[in-house]
């Protein structure tokens, strides 16, 4: 077998195609005269260029067949070899782990390298309601008003000839002293018709008089009496000139003392 393989190798190396002979045959085919034309139907003619291409293909096929035969013979007797290949850079990068994103790529899972500042609480100015919080009007309050709250309103039964002004107040602790004052502006025809409160009548001293254009009602807690913690109502009643009466100038004041601490609340009826 080794002798045959050597002979085939030597024959392949020594083979030299006769180039001049091949070219001569190609040229002969190109310049060969056309066959005799017969009368009747004309046969389909192929141009000289097609014959030249065909001849060239025949020569190339013959050379290829010879070379393939020699190579096959040599290959059949060559021992098999195992070739180790190293992975390409792309495959290595893929096996090692996921590729890092390009500088222009954005990802939502990338950790932040900046500390997030803590949430800030909006600053508030004393005496002002923070933005976004509903603002509710309340009557003016003096020191200690946390223990005493009051509000003024017109009774819904008031009409074009008569009215009642109500003062409602709340106290957290029992009061050892209390003074409630109602001032009704003299808008024309204002005359006292009565007053009342929801506390015992004998616990208070009541006075009604005119003072500088106002009809003044004053309730004063007697010494030794106490007003319990809770909500209480004081009211002054009066006639006035016919028609709707404007109470924008009417005012009230509530002063009380609880455990030696004084408190005051005042407001209007507008």
Image (cartoon, rainbow, N blue to C red):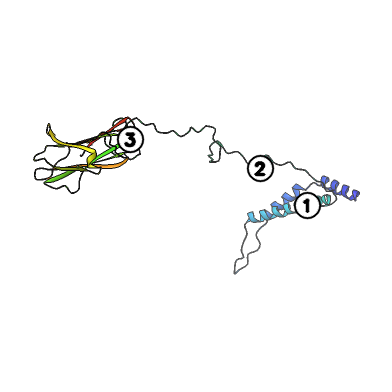
The crowd level at tag 2 (other Cα within 10 Å; few <14, some 14-19, many 20+) is few
Q: Position of residue 21 (x, y in %)?
A: 75, 50
- Residue topped by disc 2: 94
- Which residue is painted at 66% across and 42% down in the image? 94
**Picture quarter containing residue 42?**
bottom right
Q: For this rendering, which residue is in front, 108 or 211?
A: 211
SS at circle 1: helix
Q: Nearer the viewer, residue 35 or 122?
A: 122
Query: Which residue lies at the image location 89% right of the left edge and 50% below the top edge?
Result: 4
Is 75 in front, or is 250?
Answer: 250
Where is mark 3, residue-wise?
A: 147
Q: Are marks 1 and 3 in contact (CB under 8 Å)?
A: no
| For residue 22, above or below residue 36 | above
Label 1 neighbour load within 10 Å: few <14, some 14-19, many 20+: few
How many marks do you count on the picture? 3
Mark earlier in primary sequence (3, 2): 2
- Circle 3 SS class: helix
Mark number displayed over residue 80: none
- Where residue 162 appears, as percent x and y from the top left, is 13, 46
User: Left or right of 268: which side holds 147?
Assistant: right
| Label 2 secondary element | helix
Callout 3 environment at 10 Å: few (<14), some (14 to 19), or many (20+)? many
Q: Which residue is mark 1?
A: 68
CA distance for labels 1 and 2 = 40 Å
Q: CA distance from mark 3 to mark 2?
A: 77 Å
């Amino acid at each position: 077998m080794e002798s045959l393989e050597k002979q085939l190798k030597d024959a392949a190396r020594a083979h030299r195609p006769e180039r001049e002979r091949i070219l001569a045959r190609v040229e002969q085919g190109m310049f060969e005269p056309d066959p005799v034309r017969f009368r009747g139907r004309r046969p389909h003619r192929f141009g000289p260029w097609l014959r030249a291409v065909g001849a060239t293909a025949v020569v190339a096929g013959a050379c290829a067949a010879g070379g393939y035969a020699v190579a096959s013979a040599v290959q059949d007797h060559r021992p098999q070899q195992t070739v180790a290949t190293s992975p390409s850079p792309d495959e290595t990068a893929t096996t090692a782990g996921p590729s890092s994103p390009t500088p222009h790529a954005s990802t939502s899972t990338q950790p932040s390298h900046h500390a997030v500042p803590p949430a800030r609480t909006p600053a508030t100015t004393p005496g002002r309601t923070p933005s976004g919080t509903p603002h509710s009007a309340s009557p003016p309050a003096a020191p200690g008003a946390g223990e005493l709250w009051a509000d003024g309103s017109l009774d819904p039964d008031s009409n074009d000839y008569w009215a009642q002004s109500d003062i409602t107040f709340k106290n957290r602790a029992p009061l050892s002293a209390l003074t409630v004052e109602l001032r009704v502006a003299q808008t024309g025809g204002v005359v006292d018709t009565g007053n009342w409160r929801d506390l015992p009548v004998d616990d208070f001293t009541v006075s009604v008089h005119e003072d500088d254009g106002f009809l003044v009602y004053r309730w004063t807690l007697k010494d030794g009496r106490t007003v319990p913690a809770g909500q209480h109502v004081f009211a002054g009643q009066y006639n006035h000139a016919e028609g709707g009466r404007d109470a924008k100038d009417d005012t009230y004041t509530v002063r009380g003392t609880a455990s030696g601490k004084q408190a005051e609340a005042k407001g209007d009826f507008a």
